[in-house]
Image: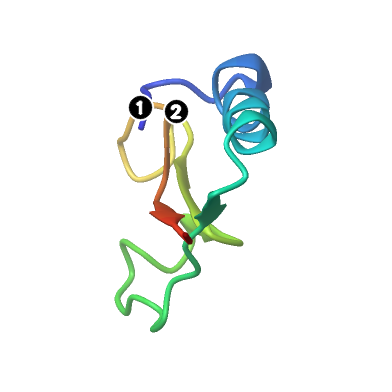
Amino acid sequence: AVCSVEPEETDTVVSGFLKNHPEFAISERSEPLRGALFDPLFLESSLRTYPGHIEMDGFFGVRLRRMK
């Protein structure tokens, strides 16, 4: 998780890690979170907030799971 929305600090880091560590994969969420706060924040398998949305700063998080 990082307090940034910049691709070079978020998706690019995750992609590079996964390329170098094939034993890991992004953990898909099994159930959607409910409620006004969470619904607009989750895109695909990551948590993203953007400055000015629901009075929050920019934030990115993803959960990785060791597969082997």
Classify residue 5 by image quadrant. Answer: top right
Which residue is pictured at 42% across the width and 54% down the height? Answer: 66
| Mark 2 and mark 1 residues within 8 Å of each other at the beta carbon | yes
Q: Which mark is residue 27?
A: none
Q: How far apart are the alpha carbons under marks 2 and 1?
A: 4 Å
Q: Secondary structure at mark 2?
A: loop
Indicate the amino acid at tag 2. Answer: Pro
- Front-most of 64 and 3? 64
Left or right: 7 as drawn, with respect to 24: right
Which residue is pictured at 33% across the width and 69% down the height? Answer: 36
Residue 64 place in picture, x, y as percent: 43, 50
Q: How is the image coloured?
A: rainbow
Classify residue 18 by image quadrant. Answer: top right
Left or right: 7 as drawn, with respect to 43: right
Name the residue beneath numbered marker 1.
57
Q: Which mark is residue 51?
A: 2
Q: Is residue 48 above or below residue 29?
A: above
Give the class, few, some or many, for how many residues have Cα within 10 Å of label 2's Cα (few <14, many ≥20).
Answer: few
Residue 4 place in picture, x, y as percent: 46, 20
Question: Which quadrant would the N terminus be assigned to in this image?
Answer: top left
Indicate the amino acid at tag 1. Answer: Asp
Q: Is residue 38 above or below residue 32?
A: above
